[in-house]
Image (cartoon, helix red, strand yellow):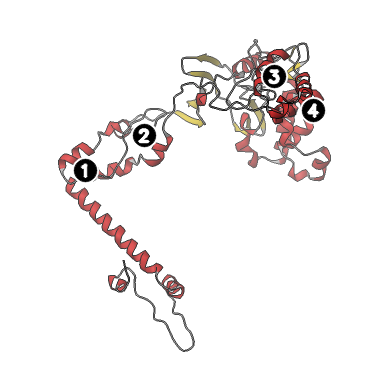
């Protein structure tokens, strides 16, 4: 990619070498738009992109939506993604609103999902414009949809269709991907090498930690979203139009949804009754989850195991974790650079004109620096007079208003 840099030479030959060809200016690293296409072609795109970190979301006109996620996002190992499996399952077997007509495929670099556009906007964007009644309606609808999804159960943690689920409660949370398993020995084999000093030196605590592992074959696992917030709920006209982004979802322990949700939730029914004008959709959802029996607390063994993991296990470092090649652009280069408009302003100018413009700019900058130096050597009162234009009056003496500092005569006697 070519960057704009001010011309520093003095001859036409130097300018010819300096000046890039117009197509060399890449205006958009996402779609490949260059300056030649921008200047000379007439196409107006109805394909629009938005981004979240290194993920891309493309609006394809009014009907379809395309998502791309790199397989080795950030150089990490591949992460299980249940979005397609759950969306397909719920659209075929329930009334839970999800993205429709989803297609999924992968190639050597990315996971792709093509789906129908969901009407509306995210609840995160809409929530400040909702009426109190709309907040109540949306919170109630969400709780009912979550309850309906929970009717689908399994005897082991998995995605619909049998895909794996990531474990961030009793497994690595950053640079490594651990899979949720019902095999305690398998889980312990990967955890044991990462035990911290306290657990490494205490057989009693190690035994208690291992025996507290709560994920067991034959227990009840319910279909859960697992990462619900305003960014993955779509709304329109005061109603929920879809729950999206089920990538962390699957058949998980029946306490999982409530444990993930209630971390930032504190209102109670009593609080809602006492503060009716402050109630939001999340408050209503919290209370409705309680009334529908979704408020399953984490059992004591799971709580103990999570506490041991959080405080007694050393997370794998990025250096120790497997590293994968992935595509990324140099964002810092863009921050420094691409002022294409400045290049266009210089495009038709001769080498002599650009050299003179550079000299004039240097003189102007030197003069400005001298003015600021002179201003800095004035007293506080003199600076105040200069800035306000007012004459200070004292005990019979008046200070004359200083002249314009842009006048070189005012710089006499001041060291530069």
Q: Residue furthest bottom?
A: 396
For label 2, the SS is loop
Q: Residue at the right extreme? A: 270
Residue 405: x percent and y percent? 34, 70
Q: Which residue is mark 4?
A: 295
Label at residue 348: 1
The location of residue 49, given as percent across then percent down, is 47, 30
Q: Residues within 10 Å of mark 3 (few under 14, many from 20)?
A: few
CB of mark 1 within 8 Å of CB of mark 3? Answer: no
Q: Earlier in the sequence, mark 4 or mark 1?
A: 4
Q: CA distance from mark 3 to mark 4?
A: 22 Å
Task: Choose the circle earlier in sequence order: 2 or 1.
Answer: 2
Report the residue marked by disc 2.
27
**Can you say whether 397 is above or below 152 in the image?**
below
Disc with the residue nearer the chain's start (1 vs 3): 3
Mark 4 element type: loop
Please state which of residues 146 and 386 is positioned toward the viewer in this rendering: 386
Q: Which mark is residue 95?
A: 3
For mark 4, does the 10 Å Cα neighbourhood hold few (<14), some (14 to 19), or many (20 or more) residues? many
Instruction: Single out the residue that lies furthest toward the front.
Output: 201
Q: Secondary structure at mark 1?
A: loop
* Residue 218 pos. (x, y %): 78, 11
Please name the residue shown 33% across and 64% down the image: 370
Q: Are marks 4 and 1 in contact (CB under 8 Å)?
A: no
Instruction: Write down the quadrant of residue 386 in the picture.
Output: bottom left
């Amino acid at each position: 990619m070519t960057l704009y840099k001010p011309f520093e030479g003095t001859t036409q030959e130097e300018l010819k070498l300096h000046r890039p060809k117009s197509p060399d200016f890449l205006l958009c690293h996402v779609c490949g738009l260059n300056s030649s296409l921008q200047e000379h072609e007439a196409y107006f795109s109805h394909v629009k992109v938005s981004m979240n970190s290194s993920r891309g979301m493309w609006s394809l006109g009014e009907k379809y939506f395309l998502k791309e996620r790199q397989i080795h996002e950030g150089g990490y190992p591949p992460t299980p993604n249940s979005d397609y499996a759950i969306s397909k399952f719920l659209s075929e077997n329930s009334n839970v609103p999800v993205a429709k007509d989803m297609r999924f495929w992968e190639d050597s670099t990315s996971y792709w999902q093509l789906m129908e556009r969901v009407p509306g906007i995210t609840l995160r964007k809409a929530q400040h414009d909702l009426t109190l009644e709309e907040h109540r309606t949306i919170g109630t609808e969400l709780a009912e949809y979550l309850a309906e999804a929970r009717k689908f159960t399994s005897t082991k943690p998995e995605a619909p269709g049998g895909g794996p689920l990531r474990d961030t409660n009793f497994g690595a949370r950053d640079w490594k991907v651990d899979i949720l398993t019902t095999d305690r020995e398998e889980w312990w084999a990967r955890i044991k090498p990462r035990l911290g000093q306290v657990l490494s030196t205490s057989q009693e605590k190690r035994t208690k930690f291992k025996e507290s592992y709560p994920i067991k074959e034959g227990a009840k696992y319910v279909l859960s979203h697992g990462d619900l917030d305003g960014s993955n709920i779509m709304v329109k006209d005061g109603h929920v139009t879809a729950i999206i982004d089920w990538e962390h979802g699957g058949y998980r322990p029946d306490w999982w949804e409530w444990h993930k949700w209630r971390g930032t939730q504190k209102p109670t029914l009593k609080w809602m009754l006492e503060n009716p004008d402050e109630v939001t959709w999340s408050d209503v959802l919290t209370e409705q989850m309680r009334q529908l029996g979704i408020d399953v607390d984490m059992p004591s063994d799971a709580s103990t195991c999570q506490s041991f993991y959080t405080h007694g296990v050393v997370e794998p470092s990025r250096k120790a974790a497997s590293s994968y090649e992935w595509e990324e652009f140099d964002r810092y280069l863009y921050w420094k650079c691409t002022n294409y408009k400045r290049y266009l302003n210089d495009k038709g100018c001769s080498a002599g004109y650009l050299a003179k413009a550079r000299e004039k700019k240097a003189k102007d900058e030197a003069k400005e620096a001298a003015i600021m130096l002179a201003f800095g050597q004035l007293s506080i009162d003199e600076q105040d007079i200069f800035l306000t234009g007012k004459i200070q009056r004292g005990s019979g003496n008046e200070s004359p208003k200083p002249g314009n500092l842009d006048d070189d005569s005012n710089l006499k006697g001041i060291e530069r």
